[in-house]
Amino acid sequence: MITVIGAGLAGSEAALAAARLGVRVRLYEMRPVKMTPAHRSGNFAELVCSNSLGGEGELQSKGLLQAELRSVGGAIVGAADASKLPAGNALAVERDEFSERVTRAVREHPLIEVLGEEVTAVPEGIAVIASGPLTSDALAADMARLTGSERLSFYDAAAPVIAFDSIDMDVAWRAGRYEQSADYINCPFTKDEYLAFFGALEQARAHTPHDWEKLEFFEGCMPIEEIARRGIDTPRFGPMSPKGLDDPRTGRWPYAVAQLRQEDREGRMWSLVGFQTGLKWGDQKVVVNLIPGLGNAEIVRYGVMHRNTYLNAPLVLESTLQLKADPTKLVAGVLAGTEGYLESAATGWLAGTNAARLALGLEPLTPPAESMLGGLTRYLASANPKGFQPMNVNWALVPELPAEINERTGKPRKLGKREKRPVMFRRGLGAFMAWAQDEAGLTVTPPPVREPEVVEPAGA
């Protein structure tokens, strides 16, 4: 028997991974008995920010991590595949359908017992702590006691969601970047419209923290108002980039573009891509209504901000995700120092697998360095602890390819991203599947490889 705390993406994946190895699991989830500021329901693996699990295909670091999880039957990526919405080369999902699929898989598994209560202290025995970015104060304090490490926190935000029938499609148009599939709604700005929008964004009132809160934002989920503080052109070189989007009325790229991505299966709700915000709701409406095509937009869910909690992973974690202070305790998800839905699921899978191995009397394992999951967990265990922030997966986490020598010059030949990343993808996936089969003793199924034409749109 092992204990898993939290039924978010990491905890749900951990419980199912351990049960798949024949180990009984006691899973604790405090929702809906005790809710958090960000969640809306008691369903497991509820997505509270974007509905995208990142870009797919051989050019994407998240594409490699998705493929690794697919190869071992990862529950979260499986539910995402079954709940997928059109989003270009991004793995976007219908969020309610997705969480309902995960909830059914967990609740219906005969080896998983679900307890609807809050855990306020680290339990005895083998346990996976995946209580998420909104870990309760009591449990966080006990984790700090156990690890001897300070608790860190940063702020995260969600973007507004717009009703489709309130979008003016005479102004906006559907298209993907560089003639990719038309899965996004694009709202084009002239220079004057952008300057008016930016001015309103500067004047809008943002979340005011309590005296004891220190606003530290994670770079990968920066609120639009914080992006704007960095300069007037920063948004249009980031989430509002017009690159690759020809306005059908002019045949040219606009001065800036706000994009919306489909949120639900029927296409009735669309979220603003890269527009995470902590603005007061009245000010959000003013700013959103200044986006061309959204002058009469109905905001069906306003952007919200909440504090995320995580450990200083390099000080407290091994690459197996075991705590250095107590190897019978494993940590996964944002609490372990990751950022992103997919990263949470992946660390949950590894923590659940290793917890099950401990229960079965086997040694915990770390995936190979060439794999994206192995690169991520090795980084968590070895990064500089000074100023540590949660990490998304990226190609810098895995070893570079050996240099190719130019036969004519005798010098190393520099490879472009589109040339080397598919090679790194296949190397990493091959190493992961061999490790999973030969060392971890798991059943492995080669996943389909999805190759998009271009990288995911800016700000997605």
Image: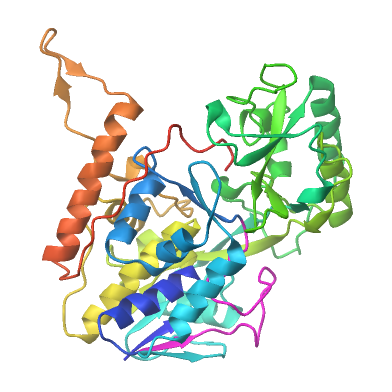
Q: Quadrant of residue 87?
A: top right
Side of 50 where 108 appears, left or right: left
Q: Quadrant of residue 188?
A: top right
Depth order, front residue of 420/388: 420
Side of 170 where 122 appears, left or right: left
**Furthest-top residue in this view:** 408
Instruction: Look at the image and say whether residue 36 sits in the magenta stretch.
Output: yes
Q: Is residue 336 visible?
A: no
Residue 202 lies, in percent from the top left, at 82, 38
Depth order, front residue of 151/105: 105
The residue segment tinted magenta is 25-49
408 w.r.t. 57: above or below: above
Instruction: Please tell me which residue is depicted at 21% across the width and 63% down the height of the picture.
Output: 444
Residue 265 lies, in percent from the top left, at 62, 58
Instruction: Look at the image and say whether residue 145 sits in the magenta stretch.
Output: no
User: Which secondary structure class fits the magenta region best?
Assistant: loop
Instruction: Please tell me which residue is depicted at 83% across the width and 41% down the height of the picture.
Output: 294
Residue 379 lies, in percent from the top left, at 33, 53
Q: Where is the C terminus found, in terms of image quarters?
A: top right
236 w.r.t. 100: above or below: above
Q: Where is the N terminus found, in terms of image quarters?
A: bottom left
29 w.r.t. 365: above or below: below
Q: Is residue 211 visible?
A: yes
Residue 11 lies, in percent from the top left, at 44, 75
**Furthest-front residue in this view:** 266
